[in-house]
Image: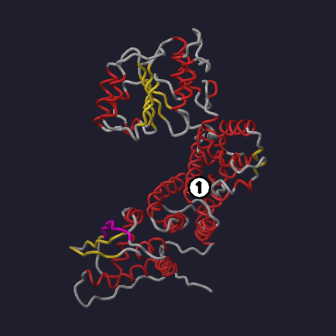
Amino acid sequence: MTSTLYRKYRPQTFAEVVGQEHVTRTLEHEVMQDKLAHAYLFCGMRGVGKTTVARLLAKAVNCQKRKPQESEPCNSCESCQAITAGRSLDLIEVDAASNRRIDDVREIREHIPYGPSQARYKVVIVDEVHMLTTEAFNALLKTLEEPPAHVLFVLCTTEVHKLPETIVSRCQRFDFRRILAAVLLERLRGIAQQEKVRVEESVLRQVVELAGGSSRDAESYLGKLLSLGEKNVTSELARLALPHADLGLALDFIGYLIAWDARAAVGLLNSFLAEGGDIAYFYRQVLELMRHMLMLKLGGDLAHEVTAELEPTLSGRVDKLSRELTQARLQRMLERWLKVEGSWRASDMWQLPLELAAVELASPEVESVEEPAPKAASARGREAGVAHASPATPIVPRPLSSSLDIDVVSERWPEVVSGLRDFNHSLSFILSVAHPVKLEEGILTVGFSYRLHLERVQDAKVRGVIEQALSAVFGTPLALKGIAEEAPVATSGDLLSNVLTTMGGRVVG
C-alpha cells in the first residue's frame, strides 16, 4: 500500500523538522540534560508538526541506544522502531475529537499507574485536546496535578484559547509557528527531487500559497500533482489537480476596489467563478493581500515579513497598491471583507455577498457616509461617472391622506428604495431585498434576510442616511430598527431582477 507524501516524509529526527527550531532546540536540550517536564502543551495551526514532534519526543526519551548528552533517537532500537510503526505499548495516542467523554479520560487514567512495559517512560499524546468535555478536563486535571514519575503527557491543540487555565498552567507550553513560504518551498523542492519528478517553480509557489503555512497541506497538494503520473509537472497540468487560483487576479480585484471601479471588480469576480475558480481560496487570497498591505503600511519588521513571503514582482505590486490607500480606508476594507465570510458560506448564491461587498468598497458615496474620500480617489470616481453624496433628484414627500401605518409604509417602500438609488446603489439594493415589519411610536422595524445587510444598516451614519430618506418620503421623522429574518430561498431570476431594478439596468440579448 502506497503511503501519502506527508506520511512517507514525516521527520524521524528533530533535525528533519522544518520551521520549528525554537521548539526542537529547547526539547533537545531537555532530553540531553534529562530535565523533562511532566506535561507539555503544543499549540499551533494544523499541519505544522505538533503530533510529529510529540512522537519524536516519545522516541528520544525512550531510545535504548541514545547515549548521554545526545538528543536524537537512533531509529534502530526496538523502542524506536515500535513507535515509528505505531505498535509501541508505551505510547498512548488519543484523538480527543472522537474520544472526548469523561469515560475516555478515565480509561487513560487506569493505564497510567502501571509502569512502561519496555521503555523508560509511558508517553500519552492527546490530540485536539480542546475538544474534551468539561467533565473530561476535570478528570484530566487531577492526573496532571499528581502524575506518576514514569508518565509524560503531550497535549496538542489548534485552539489553545478553549483550554481551561488550570490545564495550561500545569504544562510547559510551546507555540508552533506558521511555516514560512521560503522554508516550505525548499522542502517541496527536496521531496520532488527525491521522487524524481520535475515540478515547475511557479507550480511549487502556487502549492505554497494554497498551503497557507501548513507543511502537511503543502505535501498533500504536491502528492495530488505527483499522482498525475507525469515526470514533468507544468502549470497547465497542475490545473487538473489544484484549485483554480491566481494571486495576480486577486491583486487586480483589489486594484479595482481602490480605483472605485465596482463594475470591473464584480466582472472579474464573476469571470473567475465562471472559469471554475475556488471562491473560498479567492476570498482568502484577497484577505491575505489586504493584510499584507496593512503590514506594509505599519512598516518595520512587519513590512520585511511581507517582502520575504512574496515573490519580488508580487511584492512590488502589493507595495504600489498600498501606497494608493490611506491606512483608515484600508482598515475599513479589511473589516468589511472579514464580515463577508459567514454570509457567503450561508448563502445559496455564494458570489452575491462578495459582489455586494465589492460594490460597497468601490463606491465613493459609501465612503462619504463614514469619512470623506481622498481627493485623488474622488477625482477618479468623478471621471468614472460615479454619483456623489448629493442625490441627483431629491425625494419629494407626498402628503398622506390618513395617519401613517405599516400598510402605507409597505405600499410606498419602493419610493424609499428608488430615492436612495441615485445617492447610494448598495444601500438601495439592501433595502430592496428587505421589507417593513411594523411601525410603532415612530420606530419603523425592517426585516433583513442577510446578516451582512443588518450589520450595515446598524452603523449609526448609514442608519441616519436611511432615516433621512424615510423622512423625505413620509413627511415625518422615523427611526429605523433592523431585525434579522430567515433568508428566503430565492431563484436566480428573483435575484437578477432585484439587481437590475436597483442598478437601473436591463437584460440585453
Between 346 and 71, the one lying in front of the other is: 71
Among all residues in the image, which is located at the extreme front? 1
Main SS, magenta region, reads strand
Disc 1 marks which residue? Answer: 325
Q: Is residue 444 above or below residue 313?
A: below
Residue 369 at x, y percent in the picture: 45, 65
Which quarter of the rendering shows the C terminus?
bottom right
Residue located 44% across and 17% down the image: 117
Residue 379 in sight from this viewpoint: no
Residue drawn at point x = 45 percent, y = 65 percent: 347
468 versus 31 height, above or below: below
Q: Where is residue 480 shown, x and y percent of the image?
A: 31, 70
- Number of numbered callouts drawn: 1
Residue 364 horizontal/vertical position (percent): 53, 67
Query: Is residue 220 visible from the viewing direction of this image?
Result: yes
What amino acid does circle 1 point to?
A: Leu
The image quadrant where one finds the N terminus is top right
Q: Residue furthest top?
A: 68
Considering the numbered disc 1 on the image, is that residue within a helix, a strand or a loop? loop
Would you say 197 lies left or right of 426 here?
right
**Magenta stretch encompasses residue 321:** no
* Residue placed most toward the observer, 154 or 503: 154
**Range of magenta residues:** 480-487
Percent across and percent down for residue 36 are 46, 16
Query: Does 90 sit above or below residue 444?
Result: above
